Image (cartoon, rainbow, N blue to C red):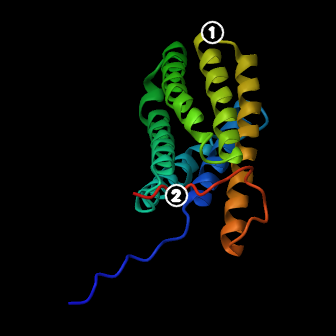
Amino acid sequence: MQAAELAPSIADPAPLGLAAFALTTFLLSAKNAGWTHGTDAWLGFALGYGGLVQLLAGMWEFRNRNVFGATAFSTYGGFWIGLGLYILLVSPKASTAELANDLAWILLAFAIFNTYMLLWSTQVSGAVFGVFLTLEATEIILSYSEFTGNASLGKIGGIVGVVTAAVAWYASAAGVINGMKGRRLLPEIGRASCRERV
């Protein structure tokens, strides 16, 4: 009887998940900052790219036995899908006060999740830690803005969100080129192997 063959490894899905998170965060944050003057362009990308594609990256991280990546990408993929559906299905029937209250609690809930992921991101890389650190600030600022009705604070949260997107894009770019070349061309700042083996 032949020995069972090991399943082939797959490409690292983290750069894709980070890119999906970055782009959608950038679009919504630019709107929150008051930089855009169009429609809710972020909404379709929340469902398709930041949502579905990031969720898929999370599922592939399960295949790679990367508990941190699977949890992070799947959760934030779900966040974008959930937020998109909320805006489409619930917000049209809500008053301004109800909408602000809902968003404040949604952001607070994800800030709680993000807090322990921020702590565990110290075990992945400096670049990933930077993503979770700036995201923590974004979520807290925006949540407080919604609770208090402080529009100026909401714009600051939007700017911090743009910084979050930039850090995530950097982490994605580093993962892409380093994965292509099989060596570290862009520093991920202290990255060890983030693959958790059982």
Residue at (47%, 28%) from the top-left corner? 92
Does residue 130 lie above or below 90 as drawn? below
Q: Position of residue 180 (x, y in %)?
A: 68, 73
Q: Position of residue 71 (x, y in %)?
A: 45, 45
Does residue 6 lie above or below 130 as drawn? below
Q: Quadrant of residue 111?
A: top right
**Cα distance, mark 1 to mark 2?**
42 Å
The three-letter amino acid code for the residue at tag 2 is Arg
**Could you tell me which secondary element the residue under label 2 belongs to?**
loop
Q: Quadrant of residue 37?
A: top right
Residue count near mark 2 (Cα–Cα under 10 Å), binned few <14, some 14–19, many ≥20? some
Residue at (63%, 37%) from the top-left corner? 132
Residue at (55%, 49%) from the top-left corner? 50
Q: Position of residue 177 (x, y in %)?
A: 72, 68
Mark before the other along the chain sequence, 1 or 2: 1
Query: For this view, does 125 lie left or right of residue 89?
Result: right
**Could you tell me which secondary element the residue under label 1 belongs to?**
helix
Disc 1: which residue:
148
Does residue 160 lie above or below 126 as drawn? above
Query: Which residue occupies the foreground of this view, 51 or 128?
Result: 128
Q: Which mark is residue 195?
A: 2
